[in-house]
Amino acid sequence: MNGAVIKNREICAGHFLLSVKLPESFKTPMPGQFVMTRDTGRNDPLLGRPFSVYHFERSENKATVEILYKVVGKGTLLLSRLREGDLLEVLGPYGRAFDVFPEAERVVFICGGIGIAPITYLASHYRKRSGARNVKLVCYYGASEAENLVGIEKIKDICSKVFICTDDGSEGYQGLVTEKFGEDVSSYEPGTSNIYACGPRPMFKQLSKLLAVNPISCQILMEERMACGVGACLGCTVLLNDAEGQRARARACIDGPVFNIRDIHWG
């Protein structure tokens, strides 16, 4: 369905926050689900682009979705040129959402780069569900350098503690976000802690190694390239380990994009 752009502003170098007004009938996305967008009336690029939901709310006679994105190619460059009042086709929500555990005492979020977007939506969902209950929300957020850190103030408002990591040491801990989490992993206990992560594949691979001997629940959101979003094109295949230890293929758009980190075959 078509939505109207409310705002589309650059919040830091190459990173934009897009807000779109949608019809009241648009279904509320659950944390981890995504939407497919396409510039209304444009045939180039032909295919839509998938985006995680950064924020969603309802008010009288309308719904509003916010998308936090980075310009990385032609599609996102064109998206960045949209202005207030422009029409944008928004389809969804699609995909499998995160499993949420209301009884969790500690919830740990690990994100790299633009992976902060779906993690923030999930964290806000946890904060609303927990109410007055004393659940501890902790976030580890990494980027290559300080100028690529986005949405810090919002995630700090939600979580009780946020660890910032940069590869070059320009802000926070100098090193990979998994290195900082690795220093603390023993303090999180299985059964009372749950981990959620979104970021680049190397981050997931290192996280899987850290959790190889630690049975903490860990769900990851894999932001694979998607052409259709509904499982028809087979362009977002993810390799899994099945119950017999054999290789199996899944489609990130409908079998995911959320997976158990221990189900992924990292090679």
Image (cartoon, rainbow, N blue to C red):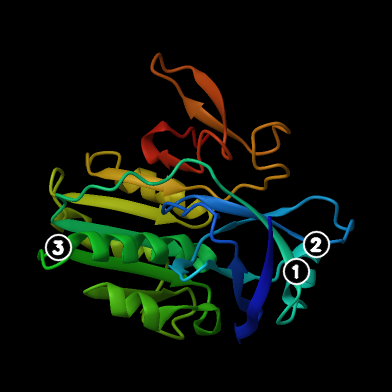
Q: Which residue is mark 1?
A: 87
Q: Which residue is mark 3?
A: 135
- Whichever of labels 1 and 3 marks the residue nearer the N terminus, that label is 1
Quadrant showing the N terminus: bottom right
Q: Is residue 132 above or below residue 102?
A: below
Whether residue 13 appears in this view of the structure is no
Q: Within 10 angstroms of label 1, few (less than 14), some, or many (20 or more) residues? A: many
Residue 2 x/y as whole percent? 70, 60
Q: Is residue 188 above or below residue 15?
A: above
Residue 95 x/y as whole percent? 52, 42
Which amino acid type is marked by label 1?
A: Leu
Q: Which residue is mark 2?
A: 40
The answer to whether the residues at label 2 and label 1 have Cβ atoms under 8 Å apart is: yes
Give the CA separation, mark 1 to mark 3: 40 Å
Q: Left of 144 or right of it: where is 216?
A: left
Give the CA separation, mark 2 to mark 3: 43 Å
Q: Is residue 167 above or below residue 252?
A: below
Q: Residue at x 23, y 59 (%)?
A: 129
Which amino acid type is marked by label 2?
A: Thr
Q: Residue at x 85, y 51 (%)?
A: 46
Which amino acid type is marked by label 3?
A: Val
Instruction: State the count of labels.
Output: 3
Q: Residue at x 42, y 45 (%)?
A: 97
- Whichever of labels 2 and 1 marks the residue nearer the N terminus, that label is 2
Q: Within 10 angstroms of label 3, few (less than 14), some, or many (20 or more) residues? A: some
Element assignment for label 3: loop
The one of 123 and 164 positioned closer to us in this rendering: 123
